[in-house]
Image: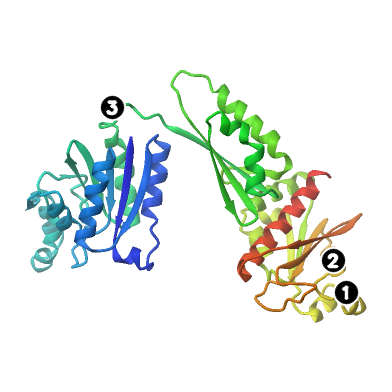
Amino acid sequence: MIGEIIAIGDELTTGRIVNTTSALAARELFFQGHEIRAMHTVGDVPALIGQALKEAVARCDFVIVTGGLGATPDDVTNGAVIEALGLDGMVHPGVHANIASRLDQATAELLARLAWLPVGAEVLDPEYRMAGYLLRHQSKPIWFLPGVPPQMEILLRTKVLPGLRDFDHDRARPVCQSIYRTCGLFETEISRRLRPLEEQGLAIGYYPVGCEVHISLATQAVPGAADAGPRTADAFIREALGDNLYGMNEKTLAAATGDLLMQRGFLLGAAESCTGGLMSATLTETPGSSRWFKGGVIAYANEIKERILGIDPVLLARFGAVSGETAQAMASGLLQRLGCDIAVSATGIAGPDGGTPDKPVGTVYLGLATRDQVSDRHVRFTGSRRQIQEKTAQTAVDMVRRALLVR
């Protein structure tokens, strides 16, 4: 079925609150085989709410509306719905009784507007203080849910998704989605490699995330049918992406790297300058990282590079702190001092100032040291200071991963 989602509230249109409810609903509906073609965010303006609702009902098979069901003056959803759809309003006896049983008389009268619903509203759960409900308009279901994420999520999973099946005469088939996580290839190159699958009509999406690109493959489950198609597509994707594919679904780059370190019995160390500890933080976000991450040093000032990592001041004076030579020396020095098996380093210019014609903002050198060799890599990133730091940390971790693949 085709649906639309309308999220209501000035807190959303002003940016005070991030709209997470629409994303949750869209994701759950997608996995159930339904198609969300539009998501709207509307402020607490009754005329706009009514217009958005009427237009959505005219376009699609069902609508989900979140927010504006509370008792404060800015909760205007119910009134807007009554006006827009030409309905009468009434105090729902079940909801009113529930409110009265929980509150003193004065407060219950104040919150009685929670029970003021359009005639014909089917309350989803009368125990809820902010009653979500279902309206059937022009033979189409419209679900109204609280804007509070935990409340909305419970009603979505327990009432809306099961209830939608009663209206789904074509019986939407659940969607199976696989996420392929890559690092090292641009989105355009990945699309070129996977074009044969796209030409077969497979639903493939591309989502850049910093230096990574995540690829989604969505297929609908066909009862009683073999899954040879998805298996063939999976094999094609893995072959096309090669070592650039580091993990599936929720697997992070740090976790994938940690798995390789544990398989080889290696301990990793990180020497950081321009990333300011972000590389180590990224690695230690992974549960169990203590089994493969030995430690890190934030060698921001040259004095720390010399005193803690043992870098020769002559080398720093000759090549500068941002150089391949310094990156190698940072990694080698950390390897010796921590006694780890592999060390990675990063030194660069994150900006927004500090760049020169020879070394503009975004210039980064990464170093990698093992017990038998040391190397460096020069990269150039664009973006804000934070974006450059994040891309540097991602690329450094990926550098370790790739080195482990060949060991």
Q: Is residue 168 left or right of residue 347?
A: left
- Residue 203 position, x and y percent, is 51, 35
Q: Earlier in the sequence, mark 3 or mark 2?
A: 3
Kindly tell me whether residue 265 is visible in this rendering: no
Instruction: Tell me: 275 left or right of 24.
Output: right
Mark sitting on residue 324: 2
Q: Residue furthest bottom?
A: 303
Give coordinates of residue 231: x percent, y percent. Answer: 60, 27
The structure residue drawn at horizontal position 25% and vertical position 48%, both measured from the top left corner, is: 55
Determine if residue 33 is in view.
yes
Taking 405 as reference, is 79 above or below it? below
Q: How many numbered circles does the render carry?
A: 3
Q: Label 3's element?
A: loop
**Helix, strand or loop at mark 1:** helix
User: Mark 2: which amino acid?
Assistant: Gly
**Amino acid type, label 1:** Phe
The residue at the point 71 percent across, 56 percent down is 397
Residue highlighted by disc 3: 169
Which of the 4 image quarters holds residue 35? Answer: top left
- Left or right side of 89 for 367: right
Q: Amino acid at mark 3?
A: His
- First along the sequence among labels 2 and 1: 1
Where does the N terminus fall, quadrant-wise?
Answer: top left
Residue designated by label 1: 319
Q: Which image quadrant is residue 9 in?
A: bottom left
Image marks 2 and 1: residues in contact by CB distance under 8 Å: yes
Depth check: give the residue in front, 253 or 388.
388
Mark 1–mark 3 distance (CA, rounded to whole Å) = 71 Å
Image-based side of 99 in relation to 327, left or right: left
| Badge number at residue 138 | none
Give the Cα distance between marks 3 and 2. Answer: 64 Å
